[in-house]
Amino acid sequence: MECLVLNGEQLTVDGLVAAARNPAIKVELAPEAIERMHYSRAAVERFVAEGRVVYGITTGFGHFQNRTIDRDHVRELQRNIIMSHATGTGTPLRRDQVRAMLIVRVNTLAKGFSGIRPLVAQALLDLLNADILPIIPCQGSLGASGDLAPLAHACLILLGLGEAVAPGQSPVHGQRMSGAEVLAHLQQEPLVLEAKEGLALTNGTALLSGLAALAIYDAEQLCRSAETIAALSMEALAALPAAFDQRLHAIRPHPRQLDSARSIRQLLQGSSFVYPSQAADPTIYGPHKVQDAYSLRCVPQVHGAIRDAACYGRWATEIELNSATDNPLIVPVDPAQPHGEYEAISGGNFHGEPLALAMDFLKVALSELGNISERRTARLVDAGLNGNLLAPFLTEQGGLHSGMMLIQYTAVALASENKVLVHPAAADTIPTSGNQEDHVSMGPTAARQAAEMLDNVVGILACEALCAAQAIDLRWRKHEHLQLGQGTAPAHQVIRQVVPFLAEDTVMYPHIEGLKQVIQAGKLALAE
């Protein structure tokens, strides 16, 4: 994809993530979107000319909704909302998060219900396409009345205010540019906002939607990587493949449970590491093994439910990506006549509850993905749990060497941290704006927590992958004829390109970080 064209109707999670993470993809407004924007803009100008009382156009905001603003102060009102609402704090958002947020904001404006001039939306695209990104603190949005503070920070640059970072540089450590320097670089003058435009730029779920899309995309890929790593652990522990039989799962036909079981079967196809191919070998459990622990045989049931949560999140997010979420909305009296009369309707489309709940649901799923992985790691390193199939802590010189003992500690620490983060953000609400805005979603908090939990789960899976590969190699040293499955063999090779077999203790953290990068790059998401 060389260009992403925004028309307010067709933005997908995949398209958004691709453009957010690849600055070479240029983003443009569709011609039909520009036409729609002209219609609603003309309506706003009529409202002002006629002296109508319309929220945010000829009135103040929030608690000041009943304060009317005369025509001479309309521009000042719109500039003031950008400046006064830029109250964010905390670590700056990542580059892909800022890009995703800007794309969502423009796509919402492209629907043509915001009453904004196309040139204002284009000014945001100019920043995006130059990859000069506003510095946006991650904290301050309540996920209702929209992502007010983050969007205000994003739009300060258009006024020649605020700060940005140069292309490709870190929002935390990169070269900072003032808003005035950005506009000089782009050879642009500071934007003079007209009626409704400051409100339209700041009011909506752009941050929440952008973060949700990135989290959903990463969670889906992480599920596939987790199944590859789980399959490696199954081979290391001589698991019973019967638990993934299609007939078993067809009797409980949750679609994504079926998908997960199918993936495991594909990954293990042709493996001689699994039981009962080595049943005659007395070192592998003996001849009467009938079932495995839940962390092995229940992978499809658990991973399938986790996939369900991601699927729900994608469904809710893609609706939100193509929704008008500011307030008020400028809508035609007769939807069949977009060139006719318009009216302003105040409502609550800015309320982030749909995605707040979806992100909290995803957080629970991510916690479970980490929990079950950590249990497999515990089984790999504990000879008492794996029936002495493997050397304690996966070292042949236990005592002198600690082997993988502390790898499980790290997995436990990350899994425990996720159990704190999983508390539902949407369960909390604190009234704001003099109790006018008396219920908020806290959705951006849920989405930020999901991103943090994703990174933790990547670390947990890296620990499991490290231990599973070590365990497989230990079994190979005793049984050279064993063969990995058609999907696990290339996965083992990918791991071994980053981490060697560890016959002796060594500094471990670089191996964990190396495997985290492999997982984040999707190199272990091998099953179809």
Image (spheres, rainbow, N blue to C red):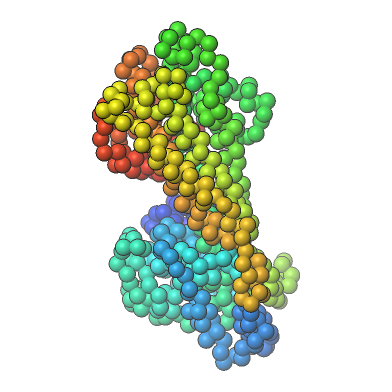
Who's the residue at 61% across and 72% down the image? 432
Left or right of 510 in this view: 483 = right
Residue 313 appearing in the image: no
Residue 507 visible within the image: yes
Q: Residue at x 28, y 24 (%)?
A: 397
Eyeballing the image, is 459 above or below 32?
above
In the displayed orientation, state which residue is furthest to the top: 280
| Residue at 58% across, 78% down | 196
Image x and y of residue 294, in percent: 55, 28
Comparing 361 with 39, the one in front is: 361
Relative image position of residue 170 (x, y in whole percent): 34, 60
Relative height, residue 364 to residue 526 (above, below): below
Pick the residue in front: 306 or 326: 306
Q: Residue 13, image x and y in percent?
A: 53, 51
When the figure is inspected, residue 68 is found, relative to residue 33, above or below; the finding is: below
The quadrant holding residue 258 is top right
Please tell me in which quadrant of the rendered image residue 499 appears. Answer: top left
Q: Residue furthest right?
A: 334
Q: Residue furthest front?
A: 399
Q: How many marks?
A: 0
Residue 477 appears left or right of 25: left
Pick the front one: 49 or 436: 436
Residue 497 is situated, as x and y percent measured from the top left of the image, at: 30, 33
